[in-house]
Structures are given as structure tokens and as C-alpha cells.
Image: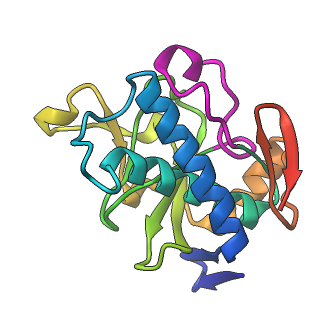
């Protein structure tokens, strides 16, 4: 189910099956990061580490965006390190999907982000299976972060984002047609949810 709120925001509700797929991908990413010493070093007694939460939430947002657009979701698992990140496909079609934990955050840059990549901002709604898409933009419009712990990163503020309804035509211009349903690729195999 997709809900448009006054065309400013779009909410996508995932089914239980879609949530299972996304959570499984997130868990596999987290396990891969831990095995390759790429994740957070948290106490083993935690039931769900912040690293696992971030990987799960990112996969849920990507899955929801794939449901919204019907474009292929590259549910990558093995190549999350910085070197391979430069060569992997974008998350969904021509877009990178970034989920933030608070509704006032913008999109933060990561290693390998290109200035003209379409960046989509996903935010929580209070329900794990409901993702709010706040808008989209390109990192060329981002500003350097002022916080010391984010030194060297750029942030695309929400005020610089375009409304979600404008993204479909931009994707079509780039040759990516929006469809119905979720298609995802794990290690080269394409599946339909």
C-alpha cells in the first residue's frame, strides 16, 4: 500500500512477507560486516546491536522504495566495504536510499557517493513496516557538516529536497521506468516478491 500525503510525503506499508525479506537482507549484511570487522564493536550480550538495527532499517527502506517504484533492488550483501562500494550498483534503479533515525535529519554523504546520484530520504513513522519518503535530491546540493564528529561529510538538508512525485519523471528521463511490485537481486539472482 502506498499513501501520498498532500504530495509532500509518500508512505509505503510493507507486508509481513516483504518485511521478512528486508530483515533477512539486513541481518545478512550485519553478519557480513561483523565477520569482516566492518561493523560496530558492541557488547555481545546486546540482543540487537546498533549495527544490526542500521542494516535492517536500511534494507527495509530500500525494499519499500523498490515497492514504490517497481525498480530492481540490488540487495547487496558482500560488498559493503569501502573499496567494493565504489563498484557496486545503486540501491534501487538510479537511486541511493538513505534512512535516518530522526525525522529532522537530512541525507549524509558516504564514501563513494557521486554528486549527481539521485538520493532518496526515508524516515521512520513509528511502525517498522511503514516508511515515509520525505524527498530526494543530489549530493551536489549538499553542504559540509559543521559537527566535529561528522567532519569531512556533507549533508543534503531536507529544505533542499524535491518532492517525491517529481522523482518518477526524473527516473524515466534516465531510462528507469516505475512499475508495480518488488524485484530484488541477491548475489546476481533476481527474485519477485
Q: Which residues are magenta?
A: 75-95
Drawn side of residue 106 relative to residue 18, left or right: left
Where residue 157 appears, as percent x and y from the top left, is: 36, 52
Where residue 191 appears, as percent x and y from the top left, is: 86, 50
Most common secondary structure along the magenta stretch: loop
Drawn side of residue 152 relative to residue 111, left or right: left
* Rendered residue at 75%/44% (across/down): 93
Judge by depth and name the residue closer to the eye, 89 or 58: 58
Where residue 25 appears, as percent x and y from the top left, is: 62, 48
In the image, residue 149 sits, relative to residue 82, either above or below, namely: below
* Rendered residue at 38%/23% (across/down): 37
In the image, residue 2 sits, relative to residue 164, either above or below, namely: below
Q: Would you say residue 23 sits in the magenta stretch? A: no
Q: How is the image coloured?
A: rainbow
Task: Report the quarter where the N terminus lies.
Answer: bottom right
* Rendered residue at 31%/50% (across/down): 50
Judge by depth and name the residue closer to the eye, 52 or 81: 52
Task: Report the quarter where the C terminus lies.
Answer: bottom right
Drawn side of residue 108 relative to residue 118, left or right: left
Tally of marks: 0
In the image, residue 51 sits, relative to residue 33, either above or below, namely: below
Question: Which residue occupies the extreme left position in the image?
Answer: 148
Judge by depth and name the residue closer to the eye, 34 or 147: 34
Question: Which residue occupies the extreme front position in the image?
Answer: 45
Amino acid at each position: 500500500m502506498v499513501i501520498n500525503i498532500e504530495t509532500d510525503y509518500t508512505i509505503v506499508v510493507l507486508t509481513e512477507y516483504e518485511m521478512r525479506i528486508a530483515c533477512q537482507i539486513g541481518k545478512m549484511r550485519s553478519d557480513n560486516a561483523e565477520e569482516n570487522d566492518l561493523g560496530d564493536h558492541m557488547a555481545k550480550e546486546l540482543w540487537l546491536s546498533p549495527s544490526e538495527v542500521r542494516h535492517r532499517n536500511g534494507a527495509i527502506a530500500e525494499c519499500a522504495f523498490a515497492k514504490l517504484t517497481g525498480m530492481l533492488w540490488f540487495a547487496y550483501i558482500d560488498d559493503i566495504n569501502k573499496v567494493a562500494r565504489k563498484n557496486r550498483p545503486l540501491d534501487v534503479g538510479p537511486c541511493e536510499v538513505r534512512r535516518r533515525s530522526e525525522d529532522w535529519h537530512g541525507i549524509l554523504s558516504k564514501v563513494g557517493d557521486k554528486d549527481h546520484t539521485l538520493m532518496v530520504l526515508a524516515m521512520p513513522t513509528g511502525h517498522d513496516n511503514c516508511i515515509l519518503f520525505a524527498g530526494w535530491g543530489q549530493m551536489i546540493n549538499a553542504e559540509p557538516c559543521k559537527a566535529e564528529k561528522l567532519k569531512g561529510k556533507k549533508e543534503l538538508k531536507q529544505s533542499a529536497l524535491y518532492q517525491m512525485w517529481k522523482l518518477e519523471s526524473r527516473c524515466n528521463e534516465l531510462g528507469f521506468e516505475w512499475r508495480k511490485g518488488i524485484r530484488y537481486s541477491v548475489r546476481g539472482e533476481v527474485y519477485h516478491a
